[in-house]
Image (spheres, rainbow, N blue to C red):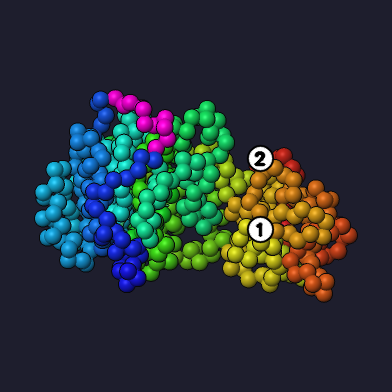
Amino acid sequence: MKELFKINQFNLMASDLIALNRSLPDVRLEGCKTKTYPDDLPNTSIVIVFHNEAWSTLLRTVHSVINRSPRRLLSEVILVDDASERDFLKSSLEKYVKRLEVPIKIIRMEQRSGLIRARLRGAKASKGQVITFLDAHCECTLGWLEPLLARIKEDRRTVVCPIIDVISDDTFEYMAGSDMTYGGFNWKLNFRWYPVPQREMDRRKGDRTLPVRTPTMAGGLFSIDRNYFEEIGTYDSGMDIWGGENLEMSFRIWQCGGSLEIVTCSHVGHVFRKATPYTFPGGTGHVINKNNRRLAEVWMDEFKDFFYIISPGVVKVDYGDVSVRKMLRGKLKCKPFSWYLENIYPDSQIPRRYYSLGEIRNVETNQCLDNMGRKENEKVGIFNCHGMGGNQVFSYTADKEIRTDDLCLDVSRLSGPVIMLKCHHMRGNQLWEYDSETRTFLHVITQSCLTVGKVEDGVHGPTVEFCNGSPLQKWTLRNYTRLEVFSNIFYSPTDYFL
Ligand code: LR7
Ligand code: MN
């Protein structure tokens, strides 16, 4: 079992023992089970790209599509083989799919191209009114397709995702995903799930069966009107292998007038893996950095700095030519990234308005605040400044938080240690007032100052102490960014340029 696990980074032995057409629990909300949909829904092509996928997971995906989709809504299934090296994916696969009752097309990439270009090829060959993309290790559940297509019929500029349930990589047990999480991303441009905020619950008047507007999508499972897919600029074909395309498409959809939703009545399972089983020609880091740079350069405007300052290495990556994508942005008259943050993702980890971004350096010791790995509930440290971004990057925001990603500097009592806690926007223990003249950070609630702990007292991290004018309480902030609105509220604009 352990040997077989390595081939695909999931329990292949378990998968091979489970029927290709196994039953699954109906995990939908009660309110979803009784919904009805129009008779004239658009039909869809299903596009599944794969590189060295296992037989049982690939075919279980195909069977679940066939078994749980009304035949009239299924135009075809397109399998795009991204230059797999496994024999059973050649003629055996072709023979097997011929006997299935739905037309299945197999397209072979002549060389390893990555999932983005493979999907582009599949989309081009498809003829359904809608294109539905799935990873090659999914299982569709009862009633998954109708609510997706119905939403697109209502509004063809809505791109829709199902709730992605978890198929255990160990036991292949099927576990319902939550309708209370949606897609976001962090400063490093990693896709992350976050709780659906109250404003989105309110907009839906508490009805959890209504679609959730999501800032980003995971990327693997979604349906899109085929003409809209073209109009909005398909994918960035300059992206290699894996990564970045999901955020690129999410930003593009929102900024260029579409919308992105999780349709909570649709559930599709996916085998989540802890590691990738396949190679990244050119190196994993290089590939992902290149893709992320392409999306940051085209879509994120000045907010790309959050990504670049925390990961200075990416700035050195050759990301090719993005002029065609920039032209697309112009042609579609897409809105700025600040609009997206303001209107679509106000709870983002990236503050819309902020004062500083970069290291926070103590005047006396010349050392820098350090979040020591960005762990919740951990003490903040103070170490020699390394200028390498990462754990020494903080932003002092217009909300007067000192934050790094979704964590904020927080302290609950005088002389207490400063720790990192989830930002709560309730001011309280996370409210800091910077004074550019004295260069102090006043912790408002305790009326004390951010101070370097004295090592001789056995304190290594910063604390808050009565303000006494000591240089141990003076801090310089880097990369002051003057944002108009912010400056008008608080200080005169020139105050903050050192
Ligand atoms: O070179 C490649 N060629 C391919 O055809 C590399 C991959 N692939 C195929 C692969 O066989 C698979 O079918 O592309 C598909 C996605 O690759 P995975 O399953 O290794 O990716 P993932 O599930 O870890 O990653 C998520 O993020 C990716 C970013 O590029 C893609 O958008 C994936 O589709 C996406 N998967 C999901 O959204 C499922 C939910 C995961 C989450 C969160
Ligand atoms: Mn996957």
Mark 2, residue position:
485
Image quadrant where residue 36 sits: top left
Mark 1, residue position:
377
Checking the image for residue 166, the label placed there is none
x and y percentages locating residue 481 in the rendered image: 64, 51
Q: In what element is the residue under mark 2?
A: helix
Image quadrant where residue 93 sits: bottom left
**Residue at mark 2 to residue at mark 1: CA–CA distance:** 32 Å
Residue 34 is covered by the magenta coloring: yes
Can residue 406 be seen at all in this image of the molecule? yes
Callout 2 environment at 10 Å: few (<14), some (14 to 19), or many (20+)?
A: few
Residue for point 16% across, 49% down:
105
Which part of the image, by quadrant, shows the N terminus? bottom left
Q: Nearer the viewer, residue 47 or 366?
A: 47
* Figure quarter occupied by ligand 1: bottom left
Range covered by the magenta-colored residues: 28-38
Q: Is residue 171 left or right of residue 479?
A: left
Can residue 331 be seen at all in this image of the molecule? no
- What's the residue type where badge 2 is placed? Val
Residue 141 is covered by the magenta coloring: no
Residue for point 25% across, 38% down:
69
Q: Nearer the viewer, residue 57 or 286?
A: 57
Decide which of tag 2 and tag 1 comes sooner along the chain: 1
Is there CB contact under 8 Å for labels 2 and 1? no
x and y percentages locating residue 152 in the rendered image: 33, 32
- What's the residue type where badge 1 is placed? Asn
x and y percentages locating residue 157 in the rendered image: 36, 34
